[in-house]
Image (cartoon, rainbow, N blue to C red):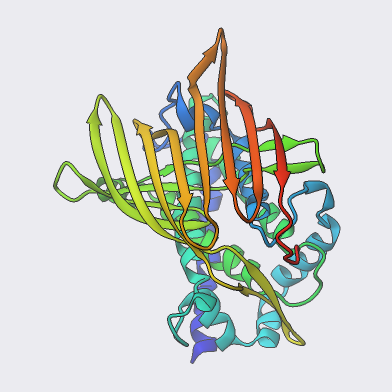
Amino acid sequence: MIRLLCKSLLVPLLVAMPAVAQAQEPTAVAPPVYWHGALSGSEQQFNPATVWLNGTYDILRGISYQDSPFRVDYWGGIRNVGRNLLHPLDNLDRIGWARFAAHEIFPYRGWDVRYGQFVPNIVLHGFGEGMLYRKLDEWYAAHDVAYPRLAALGTIVAMQLGNEVVENGGYQGAVQDPIADVWIFNPIGLLLFSHDPFVRALDRWVHISYWPSQAVFAPQGLRLLNAGENYGMKVTTGLPVRGFMYYGVQGLFGASVPLGAGHDLSVAGGYRLLQLKAEERVDGRTMVPDGDGDWELGVFWDRDDSLQMSAIAGLVTDPSLRFEFYPGLLNLGPVSLGGFVKVSSMEGFATGLTIGGSPLGLGALAPRDHGLERF
């Protein structure tokens, strides 16, 4: 029964093919829903290069992974992810369909963090990156690219496959995560957000904003710092105050209060998963939570859904503070500057400076050895 259910979920890839074919049409649906070209904040940083960089290397911000893009075994990742994606049914027969369903689809074996992978699958790969595909379509159309939907599709697929390769690294064997992401949740997101009535109906109730971190390169150790996908979601309540969710490596829930003139202040708290470990068996590898996570509190200021400034504090397991401000708040003549500062009891100190429109800034760090195995 579980095997039949999981196989049926692979159908979205085939259903999505007509929508992919329509990507050849040289038009985008107007007016735009997600791309508005704000002159300050996270929107000033939005472009295909920023999307690819933050999505591809998102996993490197986790403390269980090393943070240098030059130490990633790309060829090993390409070979293994390719084998798993080309032969998904064979690999899931090895992994076990029940195990795959419990980790990736729905935690029917128990509400435990080790079975929580379905949450980022739905929120990030389904809704988040589906919205991101639509936003790229609108961005390309606004920049007069002849085939905006096709360009958006190419950008988002390149990012998603790059993310799977970096996350896999040099491991060789059956892995379930890329099968769930690439053959189920990514196509569902692309299909839903290609459908204009769905997009506009959803946006009346839940507005999704792309609030990525600002990636910087640190010459010390050739490291990539602060790269990552994050999303802010505001839920209509019928009141001036809206429900709010911030999702990246953490899930924070709270409220968003309008301040006037398009400004909103959002406050949210929730849980962050800190560490992962590889659970390797003869039938494949699964990445599962290791140790305690942390409770966090975040404050976010945005203007017209473009994030201007944020501060997130870790409260228990990893007392920490990450403060980030985006280009447009600080200008030196024609140059618009952004940056971040992070202080963590587990990871040490890191900081960086970015320039408006550039996908990569310059950073520095004073790392702390937390004694964990890094992938």
Q: Nearer the viewer, residue 118 or 110?
A: 110
- Position of 303 with respect to 5 (left or right) is left
At 59% across and 24% down in the image, what residue appears? Answer: 357
Q: Nearer the viewer, residue 299 or 100?
A: 299
Q: How many marks?
A: 0
Q: Is residue 325 visible?
A: yes
Residue 47, percent from left and from top: 57, 32
Q: Is residue 150 visible?
A: no
Residue 260, percent from left and from top: 23, 27
Q: Nearer the viewer, residue 79 or 370?
A: 370
Q: Quadrant of the C terminus?
A: bottom right
- Position of 94 with respect to 330 (left or right) is right
- Answer above or below: position of 254 versus 209: below
Residue positioned most to the left: 239
Q: Nearer the viewer, residue 106 or 200?
A: 106
At 71% across and 40% down in the image, what residue appears? Answer: 365
At 51% across and 45% down in the image, what residue appears? Answer: 321
State which quadrant residue 277 falls in. Answer: bottom right
At 47% across and 39% down in the image, what residue appears? Answer: 135
Residue 344, percent from left and from top: 59, 50
- Answer above or below: position of 19 versus 52: below
- Answer above or below: position of 160 versus 283: above
Residue 145, percent from left and from top: 57, 28
- Position of 163 with respect to 271 (left or right) is right
State which quadrant residue 359 falls in. Answer: top right
Residue positioned most to the bottom: 1
